[in-house]
Image: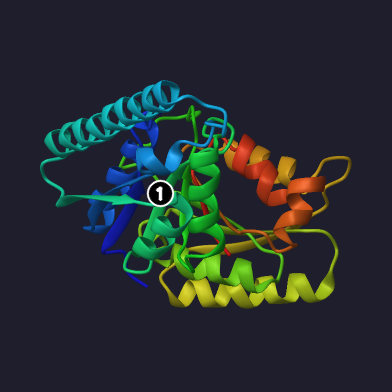
Amino acid sequence: MSIKRILLPVNGRDDVSEVVHLAFDVARMVDAEVEVLHPYVPYYDAITTVGEAGSAAQIARDIELARSRFETENAQAKRLFETISEAHADIKTSFVEMAGRAHDIVMRRAFSSDLIVIGNAKAFDSVFWRDVYDGALIHSARPVLVAPTKPRTPVATDNFASDVLIAWNGTAESARAVSAAEPFFANADQVRILTIGDDSPQAETAEQMKVFATLHGANASVRVIEAGNKSVAEVLIEDASANPGTLLVMGAYSHARWRERLFGGVTQDVLHQAGVPVLMAH
């Protein structure tokens, strides 16, 4: 696959500077355009606290407060886009503003994009961003690149994805993630396929993926290791963090999403803890 359009969701409240840097570094690397998307809830849909006993004056005040808050956020989102456009004048950039639930808007706009770039779930933990994650990761059928909140090493065009680490577990999700990573193979110094555990069929398919990655221009290798006393997520994050410029590639939610949210799982742990960019596919 090739990457020609990158979707970058924003709002008028949160600092997305690290996410922006990553999105434009990738756009510059693969010669893609960036669509800055601002999903927002209309102020009249956001008023949910007025009870039947509320006076007309109280209702009017609530409406005015909601209107003012959302007008401010919308204006801030537009200013952010203007700042982004000026800072990255060499990249074709467009701005789309849509009213509705972020989940639905991100999903629909992603259909005509090749890649979605969002932030680390630990820093972006709000109703808005959880909706963005659901629309992007679960329902869009598009790969998602997750930016670390505080990168251990600077994410620069000449360094990004010089080391591609594929977390291979033999699932359809991980296979989709490998395909999503193909645009980065040719420029990577190494593509490391890592499988955890002594599952023979899983190790066998890892060797098949090595051949597949090589066909797509990768300098590929396979390593099978045991997690020991560590969780799978800990092993992946530790390995990925050891080399500057690592892009971690993995499938998302191989188990049911509700199960991971209730009991934890590799996807949730990596989304919250990884200090390197992570390319995910569901």
Query: In the figure, is residue 3 to the left or right of 184?
Result: left
Q: Amino acid at mark 1?
A: Val
In this rendering, would 179 be left or right of 254? left
State whether residue 204 appears in this view: yes
Give the left or right position of residue 236, taking residue 162 as reference: right
Corner quadrant of residue 58: top left
Is 129 in front, or is 172? 129
* Up/down of 91 relative to 205, above or below: above
* Residue at the spot 52% in from the left edge and 48% down from the top edge: 131
Residue occupying image coordinates x 72% and y 45%: 233
Seen at 53% across and 38% down, the residue is 120
> Which quarter of the rendering shows the C terminus?
bottom right
Q: Nearer the viewer, residue 217 or 233?
A: 233
- 112 or 244, which is in the foreground? 112
Estimate the x, y position of residue 114 in percent, counting from the top left.
35, 65
Scheme of image coloration: rainbow
The image shows residue 224 at horizontal and vertical percentages of: 75, 59
Q: Quadrant of the N terminus?
A: bottom left
Residue 125, image x, y percentages: 57, 34
Q: Helix, strand or loop at disc 1?
A: strand
Residue 10 in view: no
Question: Residue visible at 79% across and 47% down?
Answer: 262
Q: Residues within 10 Å of mark 1 (few under 14, many from 20)?
A: many
The residue under label 1 is 117
Please, which residue is most extreme toward the right here?
A: 229
Q: How many marks?
A: 1
Quadrant in the picture for residue 280 = bottom right
Question: In the figure, 148 relative to 181: above or below?
Answer: above
Residue 8: image location, x then y, percent: 34, 48
